[in-house]
Amino acid sequence: MHGRTSPLFIGRKRELDFLGEAWGAARRRDARIVGVRGTAGIGKTELVERFLRTVPGVRTVRAFGDEDALAHPWGVLEQIAEQLPTPTLARTLAGQAEAAFVGQALAAEFAAADALIVVVDDAHCGDRQSMTALRLAARRLHNAQVMLLVVHQAPGYAPGTAPDAPPLELHEGWDRIFDSPQGRLLQVEGLSADDLVRLAVATGHDGLTPPGARRLHEHTDGNAQHSILLLDQVEMRSINFGNGPLPAPRGMTQAVVARLASCARRTREVVGAAAVLGRRFRLADLRALSGVADVTVPLTEAVGAGLVKEIPGTAGQEFAFTTLLVWDRIYYDSSVERRRALHRNAALLGGPGALWHGIAASGGGTDGELAALAQGEAQAQLSRGRLPLAAVYARHAAELTPPGPDRVARVLTAAETLLVCGDATVARRYESEILAAPAGPWRDYVAGYQALISGRVAEARLLLVKALGAAGHDGAESPDAPADLRARIAAQLAIIGVVEISYPEMVEYGTAAVAAGSREQWVRAFAWFAQSLGWTLAGRAGEALWSLADADLPGSAAGLDGLVARGMIRLWTDDLDGASSDLRDSVARATRGEALRVGQALGFLGEVEYRPRGEHQMGSMYDLGRDRRRLGRPWGVPVAPAVPAGQVGAAG
């Protein structure tokens, strides 16, 4: 499907199918009472509105609950009565009616209608009398062409709820109705990480990367409203390349702080220690870190305040903060000195988090032993294809290392990893130190890579050609240099060929990059990307597509970058369906954690989705260039005028 979507409506096929099936049953005179449940801002109302657009011509009655009008009796039913064709319900409400009689009259009105959908939004804020009568009416609906949609928030505290405000929720009797033969319950979950990429494109927030989408998803649980607020308020680079929790809207933050302040001092201290352990923590670790032998009372109070929750299936031995927002606010509620001391003690507990606690406790000083551990973790994350996390540890390793040969090697590793991830802004901080390092193939490669990303193409070519000529020669290379350095250098030279529209360089260096080989999947995949892109722009699109025939299969040598390249080539050759399939799949897999080095998937996916069929594809190349500038990777810009679709198609 290649049409524009509502900015707030992305995905939700499963939910729309669910509602469609329920309405199909109601049309057959098998009434349905459907609960639509989800957290505030998750997209419940927009989902229902989109569903109603799929059933045009069906009579719809809408009513809304109002938290400020809870004390007003019959408020919800008065809204419904105004939209019904007969005055029966209105007359019933005008008298001193009992809920049972109102429910009976309401059921009769609904049953008399032909093909009726009744929507009660924010039903958890509906007045007691109306919701009781509606519940009684719902029990009487059987052989009627009626679907009642009860849209409501999930039980518990909403993100902005004050500590002394009781949670608003539906009467438990509704759950019994939803569980009945005529009832259904649709739990609306957050958007997936790849849906957040599409949401960002649809709302005009260009440049959200798959790792950034994962980070946004972790913080918002896919809540569309919260995600859009963060996309509006936070710099895209911070979302894509930052580390740790993202900020939250002020109202939500104030509510969490108020709930924490309402707890006893011992509870605040215990949950502060828990926050240092992480979003999820073990009871044994919390006792050891907090110094409190029995944390039952503090945790019970924290659970009651909606700050933490027990992890099911752990026999009460593991807990977690209810949201990343809560964890973030409680963590930063403690002073820097206290957090650092707690991290220092947490590192002594050992376990998989010990390294991170040690880094957090270091306070910005140097520590050779800790730096070596961080470097080892960076390499481990690189081998798993977790490039953003590898960049975080590589940067810490460099910063923790005192001046000397070890620091030079770690600065080169950190700068390259940051550039691979697209964080050119932070990588530039090491530029002067890299240029001051002893010359050699590895140093020249990283300096050339940095020059290319900064738009200094001539300088980049000189450095990279020099590096490729010296790589592998005895005595020319540092013992710390990567074994696949030739593949890395050749891939960047192929990209220069793309930038300067030099077909011989595209083919020569792209082929050399693949032939050089690498044990690292992220290096191999980028080499395949460079080769196939070079072949295509040199008029060999058919050959490039043939070489990428298995790019969508697990374990393909071309990796996810090769799948992106195939999607781009299919778009350039006007195969929109194939391009959409490849680019959607690459973004979805990247948001699930697979390594994706090139960001073109995002720009071209937007092109596929939002360009009507039949339009020439050239325009979006400039949009891609704009995105690459914003992400600090300008080498994509000159591709725009170089790819006339007709030429590429004919060449294939």
Image (cartoon, rainbow, N blue to C red):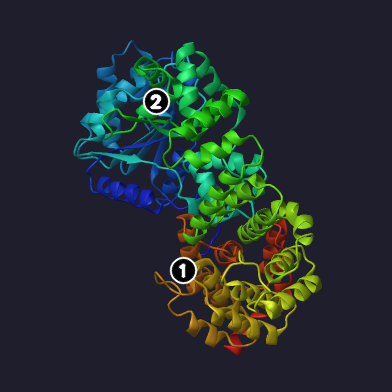
Q: Is residue 515 above or below residue 372?
A: below
Residue 252 seen in this snapshot = no
Frontmost residue, 353 versus 301: 353
Indicate left or right for 407 with 215 as reference. Answer: right
Q: Residue 391 in the image: state x and y as whole percent.
A: 59, 53
Sequence-wise first label, 2 or 1: 2
Determine whether, in the image, residue 304 is placed left or right of residue 227.
left
Which percent across, then down, holds residue 76? 41, 24
Question: Which residue is painted at 45% across and 50% down in the image?
Answer: 192
Circle 2 residue: 156
What amino acid is at disc 1? Answer: Ser
Q: Residues within 10 Å of mark 1 (few under 14, many from 20)?
A: some
Q: Secondary structure at mark 2?
A: loop
The residue at which mark 1 appears reads as 581
Q: 110 or 118, which lies in front? A: 118
* 451 up-or-down from 528: above or below: above
